[in-house]
Every structure is written in C-alpha cells, then in structure tokens.
Image (cartoon, rainbow, N blue to C red):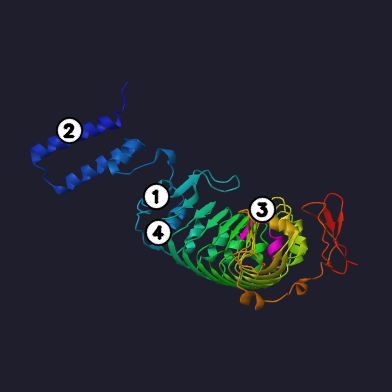
Amino acid sequence: MLTSPSPHLTLLLLFTRFASVSSRSHLKTLAMTTDLLLLLLLLLLLSSSRLALAAAFGVWINGAASSSPQSQEYEALQALKAAVVEDPRGALASWQGPNVCAYRGVYCSAPPDDAAASGAVVAGIDLNRANLRGTLPAAVSLLAHLTFLHLNSNRLAGQPPDSLRDLQYLTELDLSNNLFSGPFPAAALLIPSLVYLDLRFNAFSGGIPAEAFAKSSLDALFLNNNQFDGEIPETLWSSPATVITLANNRLTGPVPSAYGYGGRVREVLFLNNKLSGCIPEELGFLPTIEVLDLSYNSLSGHLPPTLSCLAGIEVLNIAHNQFTGELPDLVCDLKRMTNLSVSFNFFSGISQHCDRLAGRSVFDFVGNCVPGRGLQRPPPECDGGPGDGGLSCLRSIPVTRPVPCAQASVSVGVGVIVGGAMPSFGAGGVVTVTVP
C-alpha cells in the first residue's frame, strides 16, 4: 500500500533536488530559487509544531499564559508607560511585548466570577517608590479588572482622570506622595467597590465634597497634607470609614457636630488646620472613637463634660489651641487613655484626678496657666489669653439618646445644662440626655 511521504521527508527531498538542480544549472534563474523558498516556507508552516514555529521565527511564548493578553490591557499599560517622561530606576524597562503579566509591578490573576473574560487578567499595579515623573492617563480605565492601583511616592502631576470611575472592581487607590493638583478627584468616589482612598501629600485644593463621607464602601480615607480649604462637611460623622485623616490642610470653621451619627469612625485627625469654635458636646456620643487629634487649631472654650462618654478612646490630643477653664476629672478618668495632651492652651487648673496623671508620660499639660506648676506660660500671656468662653460653647442636643459612658459613677455635677435638662445617668453606665 502506497502512503504519502511525511512533510519532513518531503522537505528533505526538496532540499536534495534543489541542491542537485543548483549544481547542474548553477541556479539558472532567480525566479526558480524564489519559488522553491516560498514552497519550503509553506511546508514548514504546515508541518511544524507551535514550539518549532516559535523557534523558527523568534517568537517567545509564555507557557503559563499561552493565549495573548487582551489588547485593551496592553494598550492601557503602554499608554501609562508613554505618559511617564522620567523613569530613573528603570521600573518600566520590562514593559515590552504582549505578555503584560511579565511586566514588573503588574499582577495578574483569574478574572472575577462575573467578568466576561477568560485566562489571566491584570488585577493590580504596584509602582510604589518608583520615582516616576509624568501623568496618569485616561487609558488606565481600560484595565477593566483592576483591583488595586498603588502609585505612592512618585512625581506624577496634573489631575487624576475622570475615567477612574469606570474601574468597577477597584478596591484600593493610592495616589499619595505625588504632585497631583486641582480639586478633589470626585471620580474616585464613583468607583463602586472602592474601600481605600489615599490622597496624602499632594497639592489638591478646594473644598472636600460631602460625598467623600457618604460612600458606603469606603473604610479608609486619607486626605492629609494637601491644600483643602473651607468647612468640613457635616456628613463626616456618618461616614462608614473607620480611619479619616484631614490633618495639615487649610480647613476652617467649626468641628462638625456629631448629631445624627451613624458611622463607625475609630480614628480621626483634624490637627494643623484653622478650625475655630468649641468642641461640640455631641462628640462624646461617638461610641467607636479611639483616636481624636484636634491639636494645632484655634479651638476655644471649656471641654464638654460629654467627653467622659468616650469609653474606648486611647489618644486625645487637644494641644496648641485656646481652651480655658479647669481640666475636668471627666476627661482624666477615661480608663483606656494612653496619651492625653492638653499642652499649650490656657487651662487655669487641673482637677484632682488629672493631677494624679501629672507625673506620667501619658499626660502632657505644659504651656498652660496652672499656678505653681513648672513649664507654664508666663503670667502676661495668661492675663492676655482668650478669656473664659466656656459657657458660649453650650448647645442643645436635639435628641434623647442613651450613650455608653466611661463609668457609671461619673457625675456631671458642674452645673451644666444641656438642652434645658440635666444629663442623668442610668444603669450600666449609660447617660440619657432628655430634651423637653
């Protein structure tokens, strides 16, 4: 039975014939040579395996990702590379060729369950501390399955693109320590799955939108060390975020009232702004607060007795303000307190319980006006201080709400009337504020 020769045998026979013809006729015509070469190439394509083909044409194929990446991801990463004008550390040197999963700083994974994609997709980019100079292009939104984008400590400038809103799977956006400017990047608040937003150490300016504290998925919001100004929105305390930093901006006006709180904030930093007015009584009704820093502002008046309700607070810093009066036992009796700083105010005395903390590192009260104590302000500064504005800070609390307090035995026996009624302590260390 006759069988057709294998492709490889055919190639051998053709090579033999070609050599024989060449020796007899000395390659009579160039056309014959060209035809034979084209025929050999065709047979090679038909007979070779994918690996042989790759070797023949110099094409590198990654066995872990045999299929080509989606063209949109390649396009997005090349656009990001093109937007970088300086790469002193060669962070993007490997960003060549179609295999984007081999790029340095690019992380691939299986697509989300509800994604219309197969094979590995770009799930994250981490270019922290790469010192890249450039911009962030709108094409980054083509990375449709991105879950984190970390660009900390570079020299990226301009405004983040509005197209960020299209990254439906993005949970972490870190643009901190760059040169971004312009208004608050509102597009970030439209990212449906965003949990972590870090805009620290940039040059963002203007007001902070109320929506920044209303995004239901957000757990951490870092806005410190920018140029934000205006008043802090009242929505602050209803934010679902557990950590909020507003430090080192140009924010003005009062500390927002915590009336109608529904959030779960544990740490909030207001330090080094231009806040004024009093500490609202409602701040004592924040059951989850652990760190509260109000230092380096222009706040004044007495401390509200409701601060005694901050049972879980560990750090309270009100240093470098204009508070007056006597520092009350209600504050110094908080059981979990590990750091209490009231330095550089105008307190004229400290209560008995606070006096017990005076020799401990947990308590800092230097730079006040306490008679007979060291490291206090000189008398002329105390005489010309802000005065006693404590009573002007009292406001009505428009609800009746039981609040967990530091201890059941605490008394507000300082003659303070809140909303027309004295706060009364119920069983289990709960204070009930009754409004007639």
Determine whether the residue tagged by mark 4 lies in a helix, strand or loop. Answer: loop
Determine whether the residue tagged by mark 3 lies in a helix, strand or loop. Answer: loop
Q: Which contiguous range is marked in magenta? A: 234-244
- Residue 362 pos. (x, y %): 63, 54
Residue 16 image label: 2
Q: Which residue is mark 1?
A: 98
Does residue 170 show up? no
Task: Quarter of the image for the C terminus: give it.
Answer: bottom right
Residue 313 image label: none
Q: Earlier in the sequence, mark 1 or mark 3?
A: 1
Per the model, the C-alpha gap separating discs 2 and 4 is: 60 Å
Q: Please identify, in this view, whether the residue under mark 1 or under mark 3 is nearer the observer.
A: 3
The type of residue carrying mark 1 is Pro
The type of residue carrying mark 4 is Asn
- Residue 136 pos. (x, y %): 46, 63
In the rendered structure, the answer to whether residue 227 lies left or right of residue 60 reads right
Q: Which residue is mark 3?
A: 314
Residue 386 versus residue 201 in the image, above or below: below
Per the model, the C-alpha gap separating discs 4 and 1 is: 25 Å
Q: Nearer the viewer, residue 364 or 50?
A: 364
